[in-house]
Image (cartoon, rainbow, N blue to C red):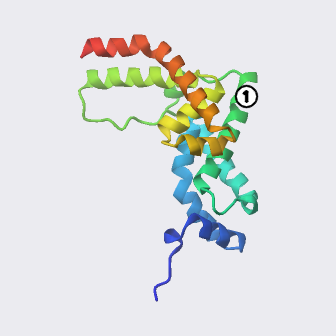
Amino acid sequence: MRTVTLVEQSDAELVRHTLSGKKTAYNTLVQRYQRQVYNLAYRMLGNAEDSGDLVQETFLRAYGALASFRQDASFLTWLYKIASNLCIDQLRSRKTRSALSLDSEREEGREPASEVRCNAPEDMAVRGAVQEVVHHAIQNLPERYRQVVVMRHLQDMSVEEISHALDLPTGTVKTHLFRAREMLRGRLRPVLEMEADGK
C-alpha cells in the first residue's frame, strides 16, 4: 500500500500532523497558501515589502493559534481572516505616519512586474495607466469596502467565504460590495469612457 505524501494530504490532516509535532506538515501548508495570502496582502496594502512581512506574520500567528482552528472549516479562509485583520491593523497604523505613494514604490522598484510582455508599447502604456488608476481607486476605498472588493473580485472568494473570514453577516458583505462598486464606478467612469473612446 502506497504511503500518502504530505503534499497530497488535506489541510485538516496537515494541521493534525503539525499539532502532533511534525513541523514539516506546517511547511507544506505555508507552501500551499503563501501566494494567495501574499496576493490578498498586496492588494490591500499596495506595497510588496509590507506584504511579504505580513505573509510571515500571518503564518506565525496561524501557527500560534493552530489549536483553535476548526478542522471542518476552510484553512485558507481562516488564513484570510488572520491576514485581513493584520492588513487593517497596518493600514490604521499607517494613518499616523505618512503613507508611501505608488510613485515612490515604482521608483524603488518594489512594484511587481507586469506579466504582459508581447503587446505594442502604446497598448501596454494605456493598459498600465488604466490598471494604475483602478489599483489607486481600490486603495482609496474605505477599509471595510476595500477588504470585500479585494476578497471578492481579486481573490475570487464567495460572499459566504468573505462573511466567514470577516465575521460579518452575508447581507452586510453584499451591502459593502454594492457600495464599493458604486464608489468605484463613480471614480472610474472618466477612465472607462476614455478607454471606450480609444477603441
Residue 116 visible here: yes
Residue 108 at x, y = what percent? 53, 29
Residue under numbered circle 1: 92
Residue 54 visible here: no
The image quadrant of residue 105 is: top right
Residue 147 at x, y = what percent? 60, 33
- The residue at the point 58 percent across, 21 percent down is 140
Foreground of the two, 28 or 167? 167
Extreme-bottom residue of the structure = 1
- The residue at the point 75 percent across, 59 percent down is 68
User: SS of the residue at dot 1?
Assistant: helix
Vertical side of 39 occupied by 146: above or below: above
Left or right placement of residue 191 versus residue 55 in this view: left
- The residue at the point 58 percent across, 58 percent down is 30
- The residue at the point 42 percent across, 25 percent down is 131
Vertical side of 17 occupied by 70: above or below: above
Amino acid type of the residue tagged 1 in the rendering: Arg
The image quadrant of residue 40 is: top right
